[in-house]
Amino acid sequence: MPSSEIHPLDLAATDLSRKIHLSDISCVEVMQAALERIASVNPAHNALVSLRTPEELLREAQGLDDELAAGTSRGWLHGMPLAIKDLSQAKGLPCTWGSLIYKDHVSEQDDPHVARIRAAGAILIGKTNTPEMGLGSHTTNKVFGPARNAFDTSRSAGGSSGGAAVALSLGLVPVADGSDMMGSLRNPAAFNGIYGFRPSYGRIASPGSADLYFSQLASTGPMGRTVRDMAALYETMAGYDGFDPLALDDEPPASDFQPSLGDGVTIGWMGDLGGYLPMENGVLETCSCSLEIMRGMGCAVEDVVPDFDFADLWFSWTTLRSFSTHFNLGPLSADPEKRQLLGAQALWEVENRSKLSVDDLERATRIRSRWFEYLARLYEKFDYLVLPSAQVFAFDVDTAWPTEIAGRTMDTYHRWMEVVIGPSLAGLPVAALPSGLGSNGLPHGVQLIGKARSDRSTLAFAAAYERAILAAGVPGVQGKVPLSGGAR
């Protein structure tokens, strides 16, 4: 590809789709460009794993070109190279869940959202790296090793959708799927300067899990370099599924939405929860850029500290999380051979579950209910609530997890991620928005938290924010990072 031409994967995904369908570029050309960039860039970042061979990918791309020539398109993702998060199953591809226990597992079927992505025409090139069982918000595991930050290879990619975020930021894929229990879309989006969306629980179906009713803390969601791309992938992934008892009915299409206006929109800035949450120096200052962008959009931004016992909220979170994860981790930990292969984060959840009683579970669910009711009252005053997406900047990739923030010791492997638990417990839609670069040159971002089931309007406001922050010329908000070797 001549150096003067724009690399196909530097285009917005929706623009690339248009070019493919207008025959301005072929599926084979897109795949060739993707494979060249992946070969040049991925070894240093380890974002993509379990890659298929170039020969079979180019053969599949040629078949999709032939379909277009015959007047047939499978959908807007026709011929576009995508990688699936290694916590989700894609038929014919390995799925390790980042665990040595499953290092040889090959999926025999697609998860529902993967089937929708495949049906829309995407070519699945491999998987995106993730931490073991998705735990810890730092993408490293004993199967593939760490994914390295898009802006600085010595730093964490975040997680658990860390490989997806890095691959997006570096232009290795046009859009990516992710999932989020404890910030797994929000944290890596902030660390890598892209957008992520955690939809309302039930928008994207998740049948086939060990428990279909209790496990309501995690949501599958899309990631993108633009909000419109992210919304288009969300529309593909979302939809009612009769095998998921908690699946929500379809919303109107998200891909044709218009960015909302900021005039009259009320924003509640929760910051560090009145000093309750320790924040690394520079985090709040970087996030303040987002608040200024929102004010410039015409929003009324007001500081608010929820009148709630945050220690109770943490108890509720850790209790429900350990009960939820135990549906999968319990049988593994009961097998002595498999237990030896589990990492520290998984073992912490297993041990924490062993200390909990039914009374603890009842107390946790009551706290969660009170929290949702409290937020519902808060939303009578505010249209959106905003929090930082993480309490730290991307940390050293060789660190297991941050053990202290601003002089405060973190008493668990995930205490440093506490800022994300409120929206997760309430099951609210959250858009992870970039705020720009800190003085250290690393990106950060904020959580835009919508009212219950307000997925479409949250995406529309996120699109208006994107337009405003691009107009302001804030650096580090599009995943456009310098790469060595002239790859970009």
Image: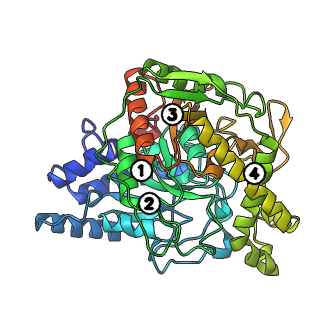
Task: Tell me the amino acid under the disc marked 2.
Answer: Ala
Q: Where residue 367 is drawn, which disc sits there? A: 4
Pointer 3 local density, CA inside 10 Å: few below 14, some 14–19, many at least 20: some
Residue depth check, mark 4 versus mark 1: number of the one nearer the observer: 4
Pointer 1 local density, CA inside 10 Å: few below 14, some 14–19, many at least 20: many
Q: Secondary structure at mark 1?
A: loop
Task: Of the two numbered discs 1 and 2 on the same chain, state the one appearing first in sequence.
Answer: 2
Task: Of the two numbered discs 2 and 3 on the same chain, state the one appearing first in sequence.
Answer: 2
Residue 37 visible from this viewpoint: yes
Q: Secondary structure at mark 4?
A: helix
Q: State if disc 1 and disc 4 touch (CB < 8 Å).
A: no
Task: Tell me the amino acid under the disc marked 4.
Answer: Ile
Q: Which residue is mark 3?
A: 383
Task: Of the two numbered discs 3 and 1 on the same chain, state the one appearing first in sequence.
Answer: 1
- Quarter of the image where one finds residue 325: bottom right
Residue depth check, mark 2 versus mark 4: number of the one nearer the observer: 4
Q: Is residue 355 above or below residue 283?
A: below
CA gap, disc 3 and disc 1:
35 Å
Residue 263 in the image: x percent, y percent? 40, 23
CA gap, disc 3 and disc 4:
23 Å
228 on left or right of 371: left
Q: Is residue 50 above or below residue 154?
A: below
Task: Of the two numbered discs 4 and 1 on the same chain, state the one appearing first in sequence.
Answer: 1
CA gap, disc 4 and disc 1:
42 Å
Residue 441 visible from this viewpoint: no
Q: State if disc 2 and disc 1 touch (CB < 8 Å).
A: yes
Task: Of the two numbered discs 3 and 4 on the same chain, state the one appearing first in sequence.
Answer: 4
Q: Which residue is mark 2?
A: 83
CA gap, disc 2 and disc 4:
38 Å
Residue depth check, mark 1 versus mark 2: number of the one nearer the observer: 2
Residue at 34%, 71% in the rendered image? 56
Task: Tell me the amino acid under the disc marked 1.
Answer: Leu
